[in-house]
Amino acid sequence: MSKSASSPANYIALTDAPEMAEKKIKRAVTDSGAEIKYDLKKKSAITNLMTIYSLLAGVSLKELEAAYRGKGYGDFKNDLAREVKKFLRVFQTKYNSFTDEAVKQILKQGAAKVGPVAEETLKRVKNKLGII
């Protein structure tokens, strides 16, 4: 899966339906062979999928290698799809709970918080440049 690829089939968007994400994962390109092994140079496709799995499930890459020793890409992709779907459901529930007004309020609070810091930084920069 590649975020720089132009086809929507090559990445999972946070707003993709969980079932669509599952289809994308199951169709994702994998390397030759069937070993689930982290190797950026020789097995970059499965390494990418392993990284996603590791981050979402909170398991180490070594743990994934051990758990899938003797198993194939199909088993791995099915389990990865389950983790991605679980993550997307939780994320999208929270994402969809924000109203436009709530987002505006969050942005307003953030601006009020960082405004004084930005002003002080700008003042120091101007002072060093001799503008003040």
Image (spheres, rainbow, N blue to C red):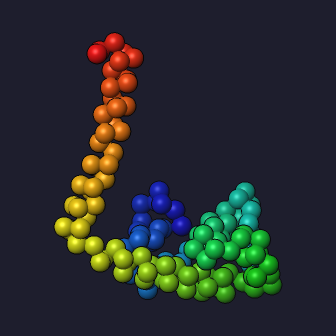
The spot of residue 51 in percent (x, y) is 63, 67
Picture residue at 49% right of the left edge, 79% below the top: 87
The spot of residue 82 in percent (x, y) is 55, 86
- Quarter of the figure with residue 115: top left
Picture residue at 34% right of the left edge, 12% below the top: 130
Instruction: Report the side of 36 relative to 94 (left or right).
Output: right
| Observer-nearest of 124 and 63 | 124
Instruction: Report the side of 108 relative to 26 (left or right).
Output: left
The spot of residue 79 in percent (x, y) is 61, 85
Q: Quadrant of the C terminus?
A: top left
Evaluate whether residue 62 shows in this view: yes
| Observer-nearest of 101 and 9 | 101
Residue farthest along the top direction in this orientation:
130
| Observer-nearest of 11 and 130 | 130
In this rendering, the answer to whether 45 lies above or below 93 is above
Residue farthest along the left direction in this orientation:
101
In this rendering, the answer to whether 89 lies above or below 120 is below
Picture residue at 67% right of the left edge, 87% below the top: 75
The spot of residue 72 in percent (x, y) is 72, 83
Instruction: Report the side of 89 relative to 77 (left or right).
Output: left
Picture residue at 49% right of the left edge, 83% below the top: 85
Evaluate whether residue 26 shows in this view: no
In this rendering, the answer to whether 115 lies above or below 7 is above
Q: Quadrant of the N terminus?
A: bottom right
- Quarter of the figure with residue 57: bottom right
How many numbered circles does the render carry?
A: 0
- Quarter of the figure with residue 88: bottom left
